Image (cartoon, coloured by chain):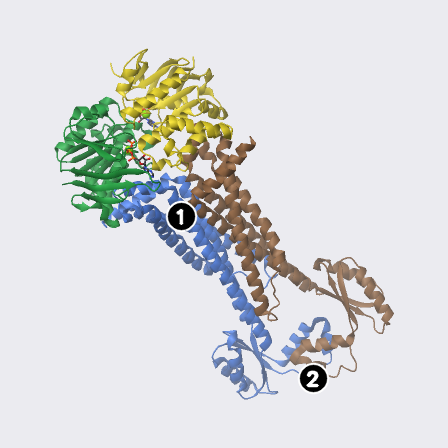
Chain colours: A brown, B blue, C green, D yellow
Amino acid sequence: MKARTVKYFFKQSTRSIWRNKVMSLASIGSVMAALLVIGIFLILVLNVDYLATKLESQVEIKVHLMDGLSENIINDINKDIKEIAGVKDSVFLSKDEALKKFNEELGENSYLLEGLEGDNPLSDSFIVTLEDPRLAPKATLAISAMSNIEKVVYGKEELEKLLNITYILRVGSLVIVGILFLISIFIISNTIKLTVFARRREIGIMKYIGATDWFVRGPFFFEGILLGLIGCIASIIILGAGYYFIANYIKQQMFGLLVISLMPFSEVIYSLIVALLVIGIIIGSLGSMISIRKFLKV
Amino acid sequence: MKARTVKYFFKQSTRSIWRNKVMSLASIGSVMAALLVIGIFLILVLNVDYLATKLESQVEIKVHLMDGLSENIINDINKDIKEIAGVKDSVFLSKDEALKKFNEELGENSYLLEGLEGDNPLSDSFIVTLEDPRLAPKATLAISAMSNIEKVVYGKEELEKLLNITYILRVGSLVIVGILFLISIFIISNTIKLTVFARRREIGIMKYIGATDWFVRGPFFFEGILLGLIGCIASIIILGAGYYFIANYIKQQMFGLLVISLMPFSEVIYSLIVALLVIGIIIGSLGSMISIRKFLKV
Amino acid sequence: MLIELVNVSKTFSDGHRALSNINIKIDNGEFVFLVGPSGAGKSTLIKLLLKELEADQGTILINDKDVTRMKRKDIPFLRRSIGVVFQDFRLLHEKTVYENVAFAMEVVEAPAKDIRRQVPIVLSLVGLSKKSNLYPSQLSGGEQQRVSLARAMVNGPSILIADEPTGNLDPDTSWEIMRNLSEINHRGTTILMATHAKEIVDAMKKRVIAIEECTIARDDKKGGYGI
Amino acid sequence: MLIELVNVSKTFSDGHRALSNINIKIDNGEFVFLVGPSGAGKSTLIKLLLKELEADQGTILINDKDVTRMKRKDIPFLRRSIGVVFQDFRLLHEKTVYENVAFAMEVVEAPAKDIRRQVPIVLSLVGLSKKSNLYPSQLSGGEQQRVSLARAMVNGPSILIADEPTGNLDPDTSWEIMRNLSEINHRGTTILMATHAKEIVDAMKKRVIAIEECTIARDDKKGGYGI
Ligand SMILES: Nc1ncnc2c1ncn2[C@@H]1O[C@H](COP(=O)(O)OP(=O)(O)OP(=O)(O)O)[C@@H](O)[C@H]1O
Ligand SMILES: Nc1ncnc2c1ncn2[C@@H]1O[C@H](COP(=O)(O)OP(=O)(O)OP(=O)(O)O)[C@@H](O)[C@H]1O
Ligand SMILES: [Mg+2]
Ligand SMILES: [Mg+2]
């Protein structure tokens, strides 16, 4: 293939998009819409994952210390804990603070604790947070083996429940995004099929004049790339702007009311761009190459 | 319009679908895919609402009774509470049961309650559930006005937080379904535009021979109905079967592991059928009527 | 007067002047040849009569109705009153020969019984009885042209316009078609035929209108193709 | 021999026998008219040469290459070696006159410089220099036919096949076109022209192959249209 042929393909494809305005707009519209669907769901999946990670990061191990340890020893323990693989942070909680916190948690039932101030039955502790909640049993074991530790506790059942929920959320949203991905590809390829179908006569004539298969395909290939690219950029702009606006709105209006917060715009936009570019352009160009096959056989 | 003309339209439209197989399949496919997207989200919205309602139904009012009331009086109070507007149920919880429950809730900290068995500081109570959590303040006031009541408590802050979350879930999912609804309509109408575009020559010739606008439109109208109907039935079958399968799977595999459960199949299927039928057929038929307009002007 | 053009002009959007100050009167029952070199404006004139194109200027009357001022909704009825053999045939590719001809009757909402009787008759007139279940793409050029003619005749229109109806036909078949047209003409149908078939025009001795360089160069009662 | 058909037969899927046992030899530089009534099988024969249709039986050699056994990927090169004026023109509606003709050169990946020089030359040969920026829908029937001819000539093919190339042309323009074809023929191009134009065939005194009822009824070295 000569360089001027590629140039020719490119010129032909832009010209054809322009001359078939009705059709080009309709197919760009459909591609864009299909990508919007994918994009919306991708955003949801990313946010579900974000939320799940946040929830998981709340898993903590409570390390109860022996009574009456010196500050030095406590600091040493802290250092040792932080050195354990998978430990993100460890915060000291004195027994007085623990009692106060417990008191608050009980709310209306706090009268049950009346009189305990003088003789606090709780112990000093470390609240250990982990990089991955699945490391909790291992970390617990490692900490238990250290000296001066009275008891190491983590909500085993709760952790399992939480991991189950986040697992289902993640798998569920991925399954749905996978289905929507397929649906979108199906919509885009059908759109391309219709576009090619509308130009079957043109394809036939080219072949009758002596054009090789790839010579007929060339402009369609570039047209597919261009239509995909335009639809893709349009959907990215719409989604990006929409997400930016909504994320900001929620931040302003709901601040404090919610535990939930949306993933930051900057983190979402890259995944979005990559995913939509790939689908839009690859499906657009390959789709037209494949759809055309039927009409090339003359 | 004569009856035989309508019959003619119908015959023409089925024939045309059959003769333009490639195109018909592609457009049915796109319509089906667009409806699938709507359907998937509709199912999600319904389930979110179902979950939100379930969460809301967990809001309860705790009615603490005076100490040492006779069984008769307690029964009377129960009757009175149940008669208050908005109250769904009211269940008696003796102070011994309450302590046991509290003990369980404290878990590892239950040693704090040691020694209280003899002198239970809790009181007998009613756990009142409501038809609508928004009625909690009113019901609380009404119960407070009754005699022999020590204290009426409901988690005011928690309720507000919950209502906020369910509100956001509901509004959020409705907004997304609305957007997807528009996107689907856009995809379907673009598909129809392409289908009509592919047959612009045919439309022109009919007009040149002296066909009136509605005579040209007739078969396209029926064709739109049929294509919409086919795409719609296909999507309903896929969604219905998929949901049935997934709901069952989750029920079997996850039973007990989760608070979440999917809405029953029978409740979902009706909303689905109505929504998809309306979109598929109405957009299909009206869409082709409108798309054709441009090419009728000859 | 059945067809009357008064001072009709047509210039295309690219500035090309196709017709300038055309005046033609055609009476009921006439047989008129429209001749002129390629690109003279014959088809343009026909398109003006069918309101496929709009005249820039002048008045066109058909059956005393002003075509230039006709409302959009009346156009189909104008077209139905005129049977047309288009130069490019304009057959529906997705319909068979039979369905293409039947379609012209379905458009006027003729009873199914009439359609079933009438269509085979005109198809046999143009010699295509055997081809009625084929699609246009399965026909030879001349056969397609004859389907177009059959469709133009099937409703028995009062005016029949034929744009180059013998361009793809051999002399024998052409004369066959001309005999058909003559017969229809004798039964009262007005015929306007644009053609390049010198021999036919010369032999038929009918009225000839020649268009050259946008204007009417000649209008002879019993003329020939050339001068 | 440039073109050679040996015992070629073609029956369509609906059972219609279009060609039966055709034997034709055409030498380099010949000018051959192909005549016969409408539906005789002239276009079918041409389509067989271009491998647009497959022969049921027999062998077709073009330039000593066996068309009937040709591989799919070689078909474009067969078609490029033959310039064709199609009976239904086959112009690309979305391309202008200039682009339609240029396309035939782009297909063979001719340099842009050659295209810019060659296309205006052939367009002026067929008298369409002024129409080069119009789309086919803006042309008269005869003008479209001449674009198709210009496209067939532009690559200077060794064989030029024309299916009814004067069907929409007035006699003057037809003769103009025939002069062009003669000239091309004198420069060495073999020409095969299917036509109904009796006068032209009679006047040119070239070889005439007549097809009637599926077979070759006549093959005269210097023949006329009819007997
Ligand atoms: N839409 C248009 N825009 C510009 N020019 C046009 C348009 N339609 C027709 N023309 C030009 O008007 C002229 C007359 O065209 P018309 O089709 O009437 O010719 P004709 O007499 O029918 O010729 P033929 O015998 O070749 O069919 C032609 O030169 C053509 O190029
Ligand atoms: N695909 C097909 N299926 C069935 N019959 C066909 C098909 N293609 C052509 N025919 C028939 O074959 C016969 C020959 O057609 P062909 O086009 O070769 O005729 P022709 O000699 O070119 O006629 P004309 O002068 O009218 O163009 C015709 O009767 C036609 O109906
Ligand atoms: Mg014309
Ligand atoms: Mg032919």
Secondary element at tag 1: helix
Chain identifier of the residue bearing label 2 in the image: B
**Which residue does the numbered mark 1 point to in the structure image?**
B192
Who is closer to the viewer here, A137 or C162? C162
Amino acid beneath label 2: Asp
Q: Position of residue C155 (x, y in %)?
A: 19, 39
Rate crowding at label 1 as few (under 14), some (14 to 19) or many (20 or more) other CA atoms within 10 Å: many
Q: Is residue D140 above or below residue B247?
A: above
Q: Position of residue D197 (x, y in %)?
A: 28, 21
For residue B119, which numbered disc appears in the image? 2
- For the point 50% across and 57% down, the residue is B41
Q: Quadrant of the C terminus of chain B?
A: top left
Q: Marks 2 and 1, how far apart in space? A: 78 Å
Instruction: Determine the quadrant in which ligand 3 lies.
Output: top left
Count of numbered circles in the view: 2
Who is closer to the viewer here, A272 or A21? A21
Rate crowding at label 2 as few (under 14), some (14 to 19) or many (20 or more) other CA atoms within 10 Å: few
Q: Position of residue C187 (x, y in %)?
A: 12, 34
Mark yes or no: residue D10 visible. Answer: no
Amino acid beneath label 1: Ile
Q: Nearer the viewer, mark 2 or mark 1?
A: 1
Chain identifier of the residue bearing label 1 in the image: B
Secondary element at tag 2: loop
